[in-house]
Amino acid sequence: MTVVALIAGVLLVAAALLTGYRVLAGPGTLDRVVAIDSIIGIAAAGLAVWAAYSDDTAVLPGIVALALVGFLGSAAVSRFRVRDDR
């Protein structure tokens, strides 16, 4: 289990770094919003890996909260973006 958690952690860090680059170099606002939403998903996945590795379920509300914040943030940005396009 330790090797699997280590590999998953390394891959999640690599994904976060690549996504962080997209946040900084994104040509448009929507590209940056999608990248930030992806970082939130990567953070939730990292918490899930930690919960599986440590057999601790105390972080599960954090995963739910991150999913909710990510969804609400994306929905809010897309709603305001539609208003700007008119």
Image (spheres, grey):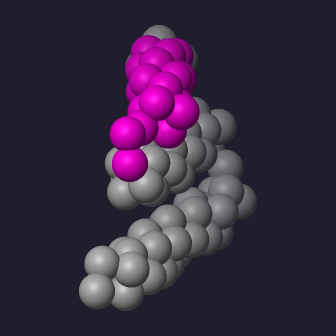
Q: Position of residue 9 (x, y in %)?
A: 52, 23
Q: Residue at x 38, y 39 (%)?
A: 27
Q: Residue at x 67, y 57 (%)?
A: 59
On the picture, is 70 further left or further right than 85?
right
On the picture, is 63 further left or further right than 71?
right
Is residue 62 visible in the rendered image? The answer is yes
Q: Is residue 25 magenta?
A: yes
Q: Nearer the viewer, residue 55 or 75?
A: 75
Q: Nearer the viewer, residue 17 or 29?
A: 29
What stretch of residues is rendered in magenta?
A: 6-28
Q: Quadrant of residue 22?
A: top left
Relative vertical location of residue 18 with respect to residue 24 in this rendering, above or below: above
Number of marks in the rendered image: 0
Relative vertical location of residue 12 with respect to residue 10 in this rendering, above or below: below
Q: Most prominent secondary structure in the magenta stretch?
A: helix
Q: Nearer the viewer, residue 17 or 31?
A: 31
- Looking at the image, the residue that sits furthest to the right is 58
Q: Position of residue 1 (x, y in %)?
A: 47, 22
- Looking at the image, the residue that sits furthest to the front is 86
Q: Position of residue 50 (x, y in %)?
A: 60, 38
Relative vertical location of residue 40 with respect to residue 70 in this rendering, above or below: above
On the picture, is 46 further left or further right than 37?
right
Quadrant showing the C terminus: bottom left
Q: Residue at x 50, y 38 (%)?
A: 23
Q: Residue at x 65, y 63 (%)?
A: 62
Q: Position of residue 45 (x, y in %)?
A: 47, 45
Q: Nearer the viewer, residue 5 or 80?
A: 80
